[in-house]
Image (spheres, coloured by chain):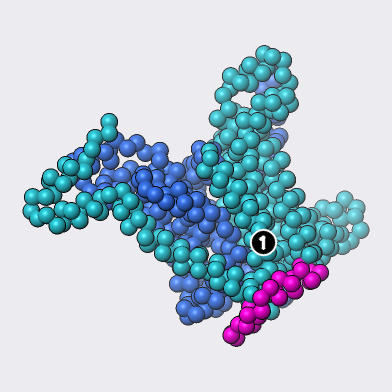
Amino acid sequence: MVTGHTRLEQAVRVWLPVGFFLLLALFPFYWMAITSVKPNAELYNRNMMPLLVHNPTLKHYVGLLTETSFLLWTWNTLLVAVISTAISLVLGTMLAYPLARMRFAGAGLIAMTVAAIYLVPQPLLFLPLADVINRLDLGNTLTAVILTYPTMLVPFCAWLLIGYFKTVPKELEEAARIDGASRFQTMRRVFLPLCTPGFISAGIFAFTLSQNEFLYALIFLTKSSVRTVPVGVIAELIRGDVFYGGQLMAGALLGSIPVALIYSFFVEHYVAGLTSGSVKA
Amino acid sequence: MSIRTEPLIGVTRAQPRRRPASLAAWLDREPVFSWLMMTAPILFLAAFVGYPFVYGILLSLQDRPVAHVGTFVGLKNFARDFNDPIFWRVAINTFVYTGVATLLKMVGGLALAVAMNQNFRMKNLVRAVLLLPFIVPTVLSTVAWMWMLDPAFSIFNWFLIALGMPKPGPSWLGNPTLAMASIIVINTWRGLPFYGITLLAGLQTVPPELYEAATIDGASGWQRFRYVTLPLLQPIILIVTLFSVIFTFADFQLVYVLTHGGPQNATQLFATYAFDIGMGAGQLGLGASVALTMLPALALLILALTLYMRRQ
């Protein structure tokens, strides 16, 4: 009896607060999902209990995929995210390796500048950048965002990779150097293959950040055919008439799925990257 | 352990010809290798961050309607900002938004971390699920909130009316105070998992012996939290808070999607106001000046954070 009582008490102590946070975190997603499968008759009936659906329908999804350019936006978003992540990992590594491993005058200054650039929020730069993009004649091209996303992602990847690189033991590199490998060969053949977990962490972060980006995409991409999902959803699924809720929620849910999927595969890397910045620092 | 390697390379490479060997040796010097390696990223950042930054300052000193040539006007744009009552409203809004949201995230994040720092089944799954608001694109989750706060079909109003409140219930995004409260709550909802999971990682590094010692000394649960947990977490709390303050202070997407700064500029922040002036009204110079007024506060925060992280 006593153990049963304390076990119950234990369960309440754990699941009452944790359950509260879970409910808070998940309710908006539940609301997205349930709204997206409600027929309009239920969606716009204010007397019906809104938490449940009686006659679920995929009508809004069909409408989203056939009447709007949603699939094209998804393709654009993935393309931009993959390319800008790749660019950022390469450029980030080129910054991080010397900063993590070499001793040279100016290293401290560069490291500080990289950290500072990472912390500069986009709203400080978007107006002059818009003018730069216009002058380069890149308005309404995916190149505009592929070039500008790495401005946030390169410093970010560099910063995360510096932390990771410093945790890798130096012995293998020293051995390679003794064997006569140049610094570049040592880095490429010996060091970088050891750092796959660091690249996965940085890559996932960069990928989710590019999927999340809104301001640059909003300014640079005004034609439907080049839009990314966040901009397309805001610009084209929110319409004047009342009956757009179902399709809007379907778009929000489908748009979240690529990020959520990638995240679920690499969640441990993600959490490791998230907490390394502040905990290990 | 430290064995000089340069002479060895010199010997192995020197056999065929002399000049490439010395070039290879030169390329292998730490500063040369480092700067060559960093050239491409530094040039990229100089072109797409450094140049726009300087150009933004020049823009703010110009009268520059979109698609026209700018004329230099000195500090007139800033003078106009400081005489603009909406600008001051925006400044107050931004500070209220940042302050309240940061406080809520900090307290809620600590609570989340403490709740998660217990042993239970499926803990990793719960942690992964709790991070969802943070990883899902902000615009898309904000759209869900927009629907939850819809003037006609709000789920909250349905419950309030079911509980006896007269129809149509509160206008969440139409009433200035409620609109500000709404954007603060949604920002908190999105940022809280970041605080919680980072602080949780910090909590897990606290040695259990410290709690045992405190318990033996007769410390209550609250005292253990106050005198053991909090002091040890302080560095992490500081870093996470600085981070979150920087990005909340310059927030754009949430407000743009939910209220466009309305009603009557009640939720207008620096970033959305700069956008309205620069992009909406096409006054690039004036818009740049509004954005730049964020710089002093941001520069202080960024400097504090980079110095602090370096010291660690």
x and y percent of residue A141 in the render?
Answer: 48, 76
In the rendered structure, the residue with mark 1 lies on which chain?
B
Residue B1 visible in rendering? yes
Task: Give, as a single range, the part of the protein colored magenta.
Answer: B62-87
- Asked if the magenta segment contains residue B78, the reply would be yes
Q: Is residue B184 above or below residue A59?
A: above
x and y percent of residue B77 in the render?
Answer: 70, 74
Q: Secondary structure at mark 1?
A: loop
In the rendered image of this protein, which colour is used for chain B?
A: cyan
> For mark 1, does the 10 Å Cα neighbourhood hold few (<14), some (14 to 19), or many (20 or more) residues?
some
Residue at coordinates 69% horizontally, 79% vertically from top-left? Answer: B281
> Given the current orientation, which residue lies at the most extreme top position?
B216
Residue at coordinates 63% horizontally, 21% vertically from top-left? Answer: B211
Q: Which residue is mark 1?
A: B294
> Given the current orientation, which residue lies at the most extreme left position?
B16
Q: Is residue B107 above or below residue B99?
A: above
In terms of depth relative to the viewer, which is nearer, B149 or B41? B41
Answer with the quarter of the image where residue B130 lies: top right
x and y percent of residue B263 in the render?
Answer: 80, 67
* Left-right relation of A200 to B19: right
Residue at coordinates 55% horizontally, 72% vertically from top-left? Answer: B55
Quadrant occupied by the N terminus of chain A: top right
Q: Is residue B188 above or below residue B140?
A: above
> Disc 1 marks which amino acid?
Met
In the rendered image of this protein, which colour is used for chain A?
A: blue
